[in-house]
Amino acid sequence: MRDFWLSCGHHLLDRDRNGRLRVTDEFMKLYLARPELVPPPDACGVERSLQAAFLADPWRPVAPVEIDAIADADARENWRYLIALRDQLAIHRTLEATYTTLVRENIQLPPIFVDQLTHLILRNALDRCQDGYALRAAELFFRPQRLTLHEGALLAADQEYVDASGRGASPLAAMLGLPGQPDIEVLADANAAGYWERSDRFDLALDLTVGRRGVAALATVIAHWVKHLLDIDVVVEPLDALRDVVLAWYVGLDTNGTRIGDALWNGVETDEPTRSRIVGLFRLTFGNAEVVIERMAGEPVHLILAMAPDRVLRMKPQNLLNGLPIRQLESVT
């Protein structure tokens, strides 16, 4: 099988007999290579000593007073977050179970930690995926996107790539905030086979126009995500528009999608600017009706994904863990 997303560090993790990701010492030590945790030249002795102790034994208990003794306030905060995540990983058997607990118990960690866990879990869930469109669509789960209309197509480009790419001349690049860059390449049948070799560059735009392959690929990834984390079989289908949609239950796949769903649920008429921000509308149905709460038996769940007014899309896949009408949600072990 072809490898992809090497930058997430999945090769430093083990798998248990159920195919879930187990943390290793090597993976935990990788956190200390992050710029937020590398001690600067003027770091205090306490910070340096704590780093050395963590490298020697990443599971060593760290008392709050040890972190409180670090001179730099930002370093103290970063270490508190790292130890909080480390402790959750130590309690739970897998990354999947850790992520589920963080979401269900609303344990607050910086988004960068949550996005990294999402990245790794999707790398595991999609391990045998041979569809470059699905893998590119999966990037929406853990990397913010900047969207633009170009020649009638709704295109998503990686926000970090866009912001880091400088200035150039292509019309598409200009609309994405890259005036003067060589044209951003859009994923298509002609280049999809090359996704694996460039997967860590995050440099391909995805066409999310209604009725095209990108939206269908995103629906496929959503179904994989639900199956991997909840062990529930679902079918996810893209819909063309809000017209004639009756919401029996809905899940916003991001903050803006939730707001639109709330408005529709409460009978508030949405205006055209609001409707134009909807990136994806999906119908989710369950393969086994027994897992669904009684009043939703036989009813579909609608999923709403929408961009912010600044045309940035920040997906919240964790909403699928808490938002579906399931009788009993058990953490994945």
Image (tube, rainbow, N blue to C red):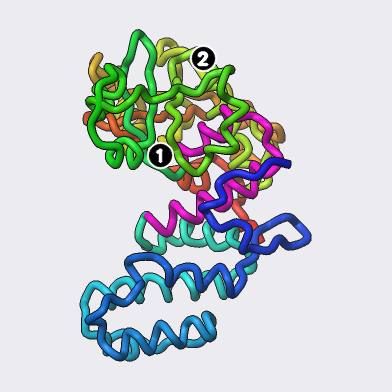
**In the rendered structure, which segment of residues is drawn in magenta?**
112-141
Task: Give the numbered dot on residue 315.
Answer: 1
The residue lying at 27 percent from left, 39 percent from top is 163
Q: Determine whether label 2 and label 1 are within 8 Å by CB.
A: no
Using the image as rendered, state which of residue 152 and residue 262 is in the foreground. Answer: 152
- From the image, give the main secondary structure of the stretch colored magenta: helix
Q: In the image, residue 108 lies at what x, y percent?
A: 37, 62
- For label 1, the SS is loop
Amino acid type assigned to the residue bearing label 1 in the image: Met
Q: Dot 2 corresponds to which residue?
A: 212
Quadrant in which the C terminus is drawn:
bottom right
Q: Secondary structure at mark 2?
A: loop
Question: Which residue extends farthest right?
Answer: 17
x, y percentage for residue 238? 53, 20
In x, y percent, where is residue 317?
A: 47, 43
Residue farthest along the top direction in this orientation: 151
Marks 2/1: CA distance? 20 Å
Q: Residue at x 69, y 41 (%)?
A: 2
Residue at x-position 42% and y-position 76%? 83
Nearer to us: label 2 or label 1: 2
